[in-house]
Image: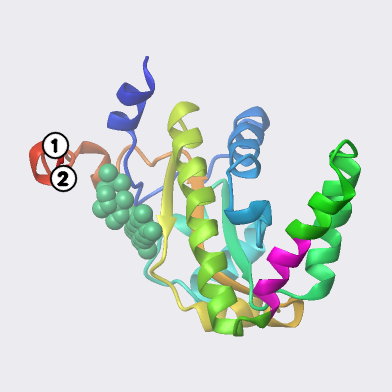
Amino acid sequence: MTLIAKLSKRYASKQMNGKKLPQNKVDNILEAIRLAPTSMGLQPFKILVVESQEIKNKIFETAAPGQPQIPNASQVLIFACYRKVTDEILDTYFDLINKTRPMLAKEKVIAYRNMMNGLLNKTADENFQWAARQAYIALGFGLTAAAEQEVDSVPIEGYNPEALDKLLNLHERNLGSVCMFAIGFRNEETDYNARLPKVRKSTLDLFEFL
Ligand SMILES: Cc1cc2nc3c(=O)[nH]c(=O)nc-3n(C[C@H](O)[C@H](O)[C@H](O)COP(=O)(O)O)c2cc1C
């Protein structure tokens, strides 16, 4: 099946069946997320992979009661972004660059770091909104990888971020959640979305060729 055929088959699953996904499928989805590009390569987020049934239940009860997929998902990924970019975060990133690309000229790396230092002068809100945009690209990679693996999934923005961040002590770690991504197996009987045709703009409505 082509990627387009798989993307046509994927849909936002509303009800999952509680079964665990094969680990290789989960690993594939996580690897696609890890490989997603981000602005300046910083990957300004952490992704929490919730496997614990107890934590899934708590998330559902305290932060997302309108999302019945959560307790019955195999995993729930939480995209949590840096609330503020710090010197320490940039130091860690540049240690990784220096280790991975020792062939780069020192002056080039210093110039790149000086350019990235601009992030330190932005407000926390500017840092967070920018980081969120990067996280959504990674979410898109995860969505595509799930479709490719023929795994059911759903992105979830409909939750209370303050409640979720408090539950997982994210603020203490300089993190704030921006969205969740549940993956698993659909419940064949109750997942009404599975049987509905896709609603999408036509090519002519969506694209304007200049
Ligand atoms: C960023 C984002 C947030 C979403 N949040 C939710 C959500 O909170 N709950 C939900 O059931 N679906 C959510 N969805 C799923 C969309 O409603 C769904 O993708 C859209 O209606 C298109 O349908 P399809 O994915 O089945 O093709 C979200 C989708 C995206 C991309």
Can residue 200 be seen?
A: no
Is any part of residue 124 visible from this angle? yes
What type is the residue that disc 1 sits on? Thr
Instruction: Give the percent coordinates (x, y) of residue 191.
Output: 30, 45
Q: Which residue is identified by label 2?
A: 206
The image shows residue 70 at horizontal and vertical percentages of: 49, 58
Quadrant where the N terminus is found in the figure: top left
Position above or below: 86 against 185 = below
In contact (CB < 8 Å): disc 2 and disc 1: yes
Type of amino acid at the residue the image marks with label 2 = Leu
Quarter assignment of residue 57: bottom right
For ligand 1, tell me if the residue under mark 2 lies within 8 Å.
no
Q: What residue span does the magenta drawing correspond to?
A: 113-120
Q: Pointer 1: what residue? A: 203
User: Farthest residue in the front direction?
Assistant: 107
| Residue in view at x 66 percent, y 62 percent | 44
The quadrant where ligand 1 appears is bottom left
Q: Does the magenta stretch include residue 116?
A: yes
Q: In this view, does 160 lie to the left or right of 174?
A: left
Residue 162 location (% of width, % of height): 54, 83
Left-right relation of 17 to 45: left
Which residue is painted at 14% across and 43% down in the image? 208
